[in-house]
Image (cartoon, coloured by chain):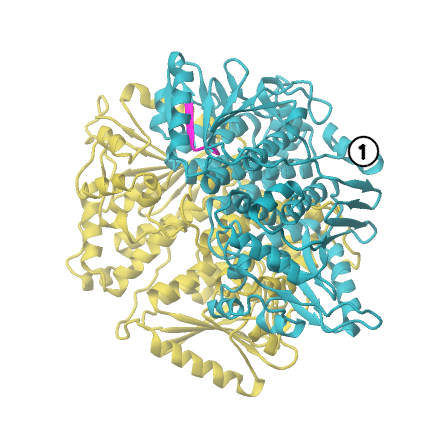
Chain colours: A cyan, B yellow
Amino acid sequence: MGQIDQAVTRQRTDQRVRIDFQTEPARYRHWRLQVDGDIATLVMDVDEKSALFEGYDLKLNSYDLGVDIELADAIERLRFEHPRVRALVLRSAKPRVFSAGANIRMLAGASHAHKVNFCKFTNETRIGIEDLSENSGVKSICAINGTAAGGGYELALATDYIMLIDDGAAAVSLPELPLLAVLPGTGGLTRVADKRRVRRDHADVFCTTEEGVKGKRAVEWRLVDAAVPGSKFDEAIAARAKELAAQSGRATSMSGIKLTPLTRKFTDDAVEYGTLTVEFDRAARIATILVRGPAAPPPASADAMVALGAEFWPLKLARELDDAILHIRLNELEVAAIVFKSSGDPNEVLAYDRFLDANPQHWLAREIRLLWKRVLKRVDLTSRSLVTLIEPGSCFAGTLAELPLASDRSYMLIGGRDGDNKPPATIALADANFGPYPMANGLTRLASRFLAAPGDLERVQAERGKMIDAETAQRLGLVTFALDDIDWNDEVRVFLEERASFSPDALTGMEANLRFAGPETMESKIFARLTAWQNWIFQRPNAIGEDGALKRYGTGHKPAFDTRRV
Amino acid sequence: MGQIDQAVTRQRTDQRVRIDFQTEPARYRHWRLQVDGDIATLVMDVDEKSALFEGYDLKLNSYDLGVDIELADAIERLRFEHPRVRALVLRSAKPRVFSAGANIRMLAGASHAHKVNFCKFTNETRIGIEDLSENSGVKSICAINGTAAGGGYELALATDYIMLIDDGAAAVSLPELPLLAVLPGTGGLTRVADKRRVRRDHADVFCTTEEGVKGKRAVEWRLVDAAVPGSKFDEAIAARAKELAAQSGRATSMSGIKLTPLTRKFTDDAVEYGTLTVEFDRAARIATILVRGPAAPPPASADAMVALGAEFWPLKLARELDDAILHIRLNELEVAAIVFKSSGDPNEVLAYDRFLDANPQHWLAREIRLLWKRVLKRVDLTSRSLVTLIEPGSCFAGTLAELPLASDRSYMLIGGRDGDNKPPATIALADANFGPYPMANGLTRLASRFLAAPGDLERVQAERGKMIDAETAQRLGLVTFALDDIDWNDEVRVFLEERASFSPDALTGMEANLRFAGPETMESKIFARLTAWQNWIFQRPNAIGEDGALKRYGTGHKPAFDTRRV
């Protein structure tokens, strides 16, 4: 068991090493976020000594999850705190090095679960950069001043324009295969093949060449967009950033809101947030996320929404839900199933959806929709069984109805419960369920659900705004099972016990296959195909065995491989 | 190491257990192929005692690779020997059992490589059944008279119409996850989600319910097309087969050709076929496939082609190449790279392509194109590095030009060699390179290659029929490297040595990602996504460890799982 494995194990007993996804620019150790008019620069300047775990130094702008958590935070702040930014430059503060990629000693020491979760989060961050460009109008440039190896080049691949210094030495490379016997793990192969459309034989040469590709050939092979002499490098970056900013459709004249720190309280068996509670039943291996509907009606105007800032209910809930999901993923590995519940007034939830719909061009309303899209995608990609229990007093309406739709199954109670005066369970749809929240496959959850019969999709579309009871919801295909009070407890208990009894790995594989029917996109390919292959390779002795390449890297000894091709 | 692992190891030393993909109906032990007018019936009647390896009995129509080899053979014979068949019924001779799926003891004892190769071949056979329907007009029915579990149901999923007996007991099921902690491995999850478009929550229930789903619910959930009472079962099958045959567009009035046995000679380091030779350099871990062009011009007429039958060069070569690829996959696990070479007159190869093009409606010409499509897909899906060496005297033209296009890289010699009077290397394209041979992603190899610049595709299209020299081929993007005689030996040697030095697993993962850029189809999803997840799960202790589900199955002891979700 490597150092990271020990560290992650340790936190389960004394909470000292809980991985925290919350940070803010003043606390960054690895990045500097500079904003100058409509151009932002993110300077990568990794602090060698500030690794997330013990046992390795983050030399040469190599990174671990801690570095990526700061990057993800910075991208969110560009969206919400700096809405005037229209172009983003990623660059390095280290001389002749852009980034050496994911830290190899960290990978060699990490548990399988940590490697897989690290790659997943890093991929999500990369896709966030692409979404920032595509949907928020912040075009991005990567200025590569030297070595961009492995994950360093993969970060560049997430930007719109890659500029490589042409000094006879600087190169882009994906040396994972020749050096480490693993794949480029954060989208590299898919982005090379599908985003940059590098010809497959060129890609083959590139991905097996440890030293990478430089200058003119890197441009010819579409690996970078320009190779620029050192004397003109800064000038060219500035000019290109200006050009991209000028092309952006993002509005220019508003000021942002402050993403204030989340208020969270961690106890042994729960995390308490402002808008939700996570409860852990460790014996049953279940995390229940209870989402609370809004406490007040939506504000009177878009200006009032801006004034509320991070306290605006949909924004606050999205941020807290995102943090809760990441916490479970990385810190609560034993959780087999996440159970979504909610409490509140579904009409109030719909009122918030109408409020956001009424301000479709408002920058903040738009960013909130985009944040929800990303959070819901994070839910889709979480390797835990997902189930929603729709009970009396719940508010799975509009945006919140995406939670049962994102679940592997949903159970809905028919009628009320004896001695309980909560209103019977309903589910309600809104425009939000028919467009703004596509899954990684490019379709809404409802469209993915009703692939077999598009008529069913039209039928539920006609029900928008109505409070749908359990039996109707089952008939419409919106929930898996509508149950009466007599059956409820047994059915739900048996299901959750069963889920905890199955092989965790087989569940992960099955859910990954069943959640994403229909078309594939670059994004879904990264998660469904590349991740799966990497998971396989991350388990193979050729990579992680005592004689494998990850373990032997840097020891002066060559790895010893099982030479059978599979 | 299980029994199969030992068996496979044994054959490498004394050749006793070489897996042979050649068979014929008279030798079938597990299937009976019955043809009655335009309706064929394939009766599954697995001989318990005729397993491919020792250590298990094939009870309850469970199967191993040997059973599937016969099925694949029968499907080929329907195409070539029975061109009048327009509908196919799959059924079982066992009472109250259709098929119990892949044999569990076989899986528990098999090496990782054998499991992966078994699933891949079985998937290819299933896709062959779908291709038979889609492109050859033989519609298929699966008549499920009892239990259809796991791979048994997956076989049904490959047919056009699934009929389940409604007797209160017969059920379809995918019990792999609850019983064995692995996934349905031959396309089941993808076909449930993407082909039959079963709603994701229904699919979740189905795939976690050991006993499966029966009768009316199976129809409602789209798992089968009809549930029919036992008293009407045979009648309903016959009626449906008649209906499907009537709808088929397949011609009705021709007789077939005989797929005569291949002539092969196995020696220690080679396999000699009529149209090609495979040579093994075991120290270097290379298999070289030397393809020979036609010895004579194409026949004068379609009737003359039929008269030639299995001796017709394109058909003979396709069958032999298919056998050679399968032999390397299953029996030569140490081979790191397959090197394609050819010898012959490229003009003659083009003449055969023109001959096939001139008879597009002829059933045999059509079946030969379809066979080549499947063989080339088999090449694409072979987990070995693929390289084509285009040298003087070679004939990579038209259909044979698909081999360099299917390769991870191609090297082409500029000009001639000293003391060698062979004509300089050329490559030539034909219509065959622009349509009839799509990859699993639905695109031709050239379209996949030139995704970045469709203009390049048009540019090479204009070169059809021309003999293209090395430098032009490189400029057009048809080959990876054009090299002169001075550099050739070193470059090729270094490449092949490098390939043999890399991690076999990482190469498999990388190649699987780079070969299939662009769109995904159900077929590419099965191989790229489902297979990758299954490979991962097949390596995890929760499945294959001493306490894992595959090992513990049938022992009376429950498996013990590592409960961390990854």
The secondary element bearing badge 1 is classed as helix
From this viewpoint, is residue B284 visible? no
Of residues B65 and B380, the one drawn nearer to the viewer in this rendering: B380
Horizontal relation, residue A267 to residue A223: left or right? right
Question: Which image quadrant is residue B75 in?
Answer: bottom left
Residue drawn where x is 54% and y is 29% of the image: A151
Q: What type is the residue that disc 1 sits on?
A: Arg
Query: If the image is split into quadrants, where does the N terminus of chain A sit?
Result: top right
From this viewpoint, is residue B451 visible? yes
Of residues B455 and B550, the one drawn nearer to the viewer in this rendering: B455
Residue drawn where x is 41% and y is 51% of the image: B440
Q: Which range of residues does the magenta coloring cover?
A: A158-163
Percent across and percent down for residue B377 are: 40, 50
Above or below, comparing residue A448 to residue B97 in the picture: above
Percent across and percent down for residue A14 are: 84, 34
Percent across and percent down for residue B85 are: 35, 73
Percent across and percent down for residue B433 are: 27, 47
Question: Which image quadrant is residue A514 in?
Answer: bottom right
Q: Which residue is mark 1?
A: A10
